[in-house]
Image (spheres, grey):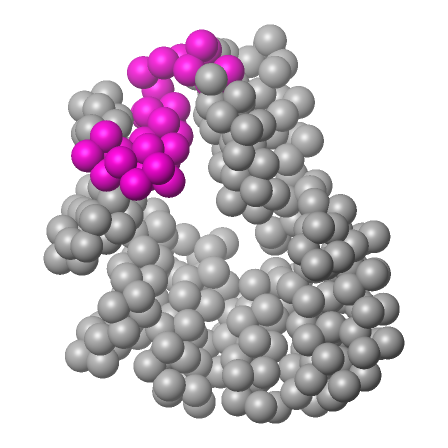
């Protein structure tokens, strides 16, 4: 449910629990590293966790993909690709390695190769929703109207493959249509995401942002306020409500929302203060 502040200490505790195998501990530390980097923007701590995982299981596919992600972030696409290939040499059906290959190709400006990698991941692991999700995301990134017609099929298949991630893939579909300025269809997918998992903040975030883009500030405010009723530490809600107050020139209320955000979501305190 994207409550990273709650999940992170569990990953860290288990990743350092010596009753588990080195391979399992390495997997957990790599998961913790990803949360540190992508959700808390703590890159140095992320690198330390990856080094811990390398010491435990240097050839584990998750560890190799973690090292590849680090290279991808540094725009070293060739090295990222090499780590993905090493991971596949260890486990040929490792979906995260195919996703890394695809992401590397896309960032290198070769979207056709990205599509091939995601398609191959879908072929080897049809029961994993991640490749479906990445293909839908690729359609959004490319903003190609012709490919949007495939989004519906991919989304439905991904949701069937892993129902637990249906809300996430529905959001990806909504964003693809939003990027194409087909807002009614985008809102339909966001509504499906919320219906599939009413306690997952992702659908609400994207729905509210789309409403803001369309100038429907009252509706967006309602969604953000509802989001805080079940996830009081949802940073995007504080940002959104503050932005709405600023747009209405209610600067005291905007400052209040940003101040609440800084106190509630400490790892975003600097951004709220700015």
Farthest residue, direction front: 274
Residue 124, image x, y percentages: 20, 42
Residue 173 picture quarter: bottom left
Image position of 265 with respect to 184: above or below:
above
Say which residue appears at 54% left-offset and 71% top-offset: 206
Left or right of 14 on screen, residue 94: left
Q: The magenta stretch spans which residues?
A: 52-80
Image position of 118 with respect to 210: above or below:
above
Image position of 95 with respect to 271: above or below:
above
Image position of 211 with respect to 241: above or below:
below
Residue 178, image x, y percentages: 41, 79
Q: Does the magenta segment cover residue 91? A: no
Q: Nearer the viewer, residue 129 or 98?
A: 98
Which quadrant is the C terminus positioned in?
bottom right
Residue 141, image x, y percentages: 30, 66
Q: Does the magenta segment cover residue 64? A: yes
Residue 56 picture quarter: top left
Q: Nearer the viewer, residue 178 or 17?
A: 178
Can residue 61 be seen in the rendering of this structure?
yes
Left or right of 132 on screen, residue 227: right
Q: Nearer the viewer, residue 251 or 20?
A: 251
Can residue 95 be seen in the rendering of this structure?
no
Residue 183 picture quarter: bottom left
Query: What main secondary structure does the magenta stretch of the protein show?
Result: helix
Q: What is the tally of numbered marks visible in this picture?
A: 0
Say which residue appears at 47% left-offset and 17% top-offset: 51
Say which residue appears at 32% left-offset and 56% top-offset: 134
Residue 168, image x, y percentages: 47, 60
């Amino acid at each position: 449910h994207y409550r990273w502040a709650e999940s992170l200490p569990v990953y860290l505790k288990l990743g350092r629990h010596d009753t588990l195998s080195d391979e399992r501990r390495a997997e957990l530390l790599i998961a913790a590293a990803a949360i540190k980097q992508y959700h808390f923007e703590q890159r140095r701590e992320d690198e330390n966790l990856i080094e811990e995982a390398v010491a435990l299981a240097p050839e584990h596919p998750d560890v190799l993909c973690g090292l590849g992600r680090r290279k991808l972030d540094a725009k070293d696409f060739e090295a990222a690709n090499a780590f993905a290939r090493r991971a596949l040499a260890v486990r040929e059906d490792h979906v995260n390695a195919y996703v890394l290959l695809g992401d590397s190709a896309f960032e290198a400006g070769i979207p056709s190769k990205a599509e091939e990698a995601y398609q191959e991941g879908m072929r080897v692991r049809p029961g994993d929703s991640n490749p479906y999700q990445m293909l839908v995301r690729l359609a959004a990134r490319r903003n190609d109207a012709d490919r949007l017609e495939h989004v519906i099929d991919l989304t439905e298949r991904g949701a069937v493959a892993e129902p637990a991630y249906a809300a996430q893939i529905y959001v990806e579909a909504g964003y693809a249509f939003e990027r194409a300025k087909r807002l009614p269809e985008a809102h339909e997918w966001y509504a499906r995401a919320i219906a599939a998992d009413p306690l997952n903040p992702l659908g609400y975030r994207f729905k509210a942002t789309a409403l803001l883009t369309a100038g429907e500030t009252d509706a967006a405010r309602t969604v953000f306020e509802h989001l805080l009723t079940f996830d009081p530490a949802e940073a995007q809600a504080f940002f959104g409500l503050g932005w709405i107050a600023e747009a209405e020139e209610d600067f005291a209320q905007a400052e209040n929302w940003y101040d609440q955000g800084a106190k509630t979501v400490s790892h975003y305190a600097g951004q709220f203060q700015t």
